[in-house]
Image: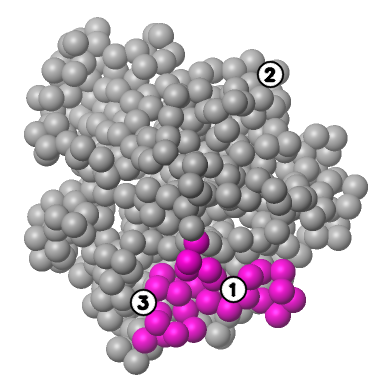
Amino acid sequence: MIIKKSLLAVGMTALTLASVQVMAKVSPEEAERLKNDLTPVGAERAGNEDGTIPAWNPNFQIPAEYNGTGSYYPNPYKDDEVLFTITAENVDQYKDKLTPGTQAMFKSYPETFEMKVYPSRRDGRYSSLAEQEVFKNATRSELIEGGNGVTNAFVGFPFPIPKTGIEALWNQMIRAGSYASDGKYSQMVVYRNGSRLHGRQHTVRYSPFQDAENHTLESFGVNGDVNPRIYQLTQTLKPTREKGKGVLVHEFINPKLKPRAAWSYIPGVRRVRRAPTINYDSPQGLGNMQTTDAFLGFNGAPDKYNWELLGKKEIYIPYNNYDFENPELSYDDILGQGHANPEHMRYELHRVWVVRGVLKDDERHVYKTRELFIDEDSWQTVYADHYDNRDVLWRTTHINTINMYDLPGIGGRTELYYDLISRDYMAANLFNEEGGVPKMNHEVKQLSYFTPNNLRKLGMR
């Protein structure tokens, strides 16, 4: 795969942790680029030379038919026509704009996997409060703990003009987004033989770190050691054998300095117990189809890997996937055997940052190498390829994105975790059959909601 180095990445190689720390924040003069040639979150404002990637459009108008937070997002591009379709027969023509994981999908499912490519759209922006804090982050945010933590960051995107892989990684881990959400969603494991396992959960979340309306950097804590970055309480509704289970998580901004805290409620025991450490390659998700640190591309402590910024590349990515969430479609409609139904997927050409993590010699993990492909406009990982300790591509993650009108901004949606060896896959964050999507920044719960005592009360109802 040929990667074109951006101006920010020319000549870059893997850097030592010491030099990583020195290069974290940028000068005030360089930060001004966020008001000129770069968008407020660090993407290139201009389109590409070929005109196949448009310039950033900050003046997007929300569709009039949108009914507000909690309702499905109407597709503003429903009249777009497919430009062309990539299939196993013509995939060689497009290899330079496809990830290894995507190419592997064509090899694994030559008869059914295809990519319908639509016109590229770069519409929408984050809130003015978020953009203001990101601008401040550019000159104040720094790496600590050898790159394993961040200080002086607030709201998200601590390093909008990244120079290193670890900085780009932190941008995708602590993104700007909603500071509160409340809603139900489903997960589905689709096994090789076509059988399915359906899970459903209700999750309530609050993030002081992203709440610029009620917090400041100082009230949150410059080192992230005053408040958790995220409070999250999840109750299992399905499958039946797990109904009533609950998990409470307090996630901190610096996982090495202050690790994730978690509690669980088991109905049969009727007690809340401190959960064992949930991190790194601990199996997670319905059917244990992913590792804990693979959620949304990568999350958690990054210390097991050396991270390298390989530059930027133009590739076809899942983008503006409104139709995939259409409530008129069932989960059976959108999830086929082997992979998501291509009829309801949308792909566009966009620029992505490419970040590679290589396992350190003295560390252990089921993934030796992982490559992340991160959308420049949102810092959302859209693809993640995972290689085992024999350097074999084992799993590939594909993440849908849309412009979430109530976020506001581009956000990750359904996550598709494909196992190329077992040929099973899991789809997380499904909304079609839930009667709506999670509400954002609406009726924020008190902090007393996110306590072990309340977890027990909810479980006993």
On screen, residue 258 above or below 153:
above
Q: Mark 1 is on which residue type?
A: Ala
Of tags 3 and 1, which is closer to the observer? 1
Image quadrant holding the C terminus, namely top left
Mark 3 falls on what kind of element? helix
Badge 1: residue crowd in 10 Å (few <14, some 14–19, many ≥20): some
Q: Which is more toward the observer, 269 or 203?
A: 203
Of tags 2 and 1, which is closer to the observer? 1
Is residue 380 left or right of 183 when viewed as pictured?
Answer: right
Task: Report the residue marked by disc 3.
Answer: 20
Of tags 2 and 3, which is closer to the observer? 2
Mark 2–mark 1 CB contact (< 8 Å): no
Task: Report the residue marked by disc 1.
Answer: 55
On screen, residue 13 above or below 203:
below
Q: CA distance from mark 2 to mark 3?
A: 47 Å
Q: Mark 3 is on which residue type?
A: Val
Q: In the image, which residues are magenta?
A: 32-60
Residue furthest to the right in view is: 89
Mark 2 falls on what kind of element? loop
Asked if residue 53 lies in the magenta stretch, the reply is yes
Residue 87, image x and y in percent?
84, 46
Task: Report the residue marked by disc 2.
Answer: 194
Asked if residue 67 lies in the magenta stretch, the reply is no
On screen, residue 27 above or below 337:
below
Mark yes or no: residue 59 visible.
yes
Please, what is the dominant secondary structure of the magenta stretch? loop
N-term-proximal mark, 2 vs 3: 3
Q: CA distance from mark 3 to mark 1?
A: 31 Å
On screen, residue 456 above or below 363:
above
Residue 410, image x and y in percent?
47, 55
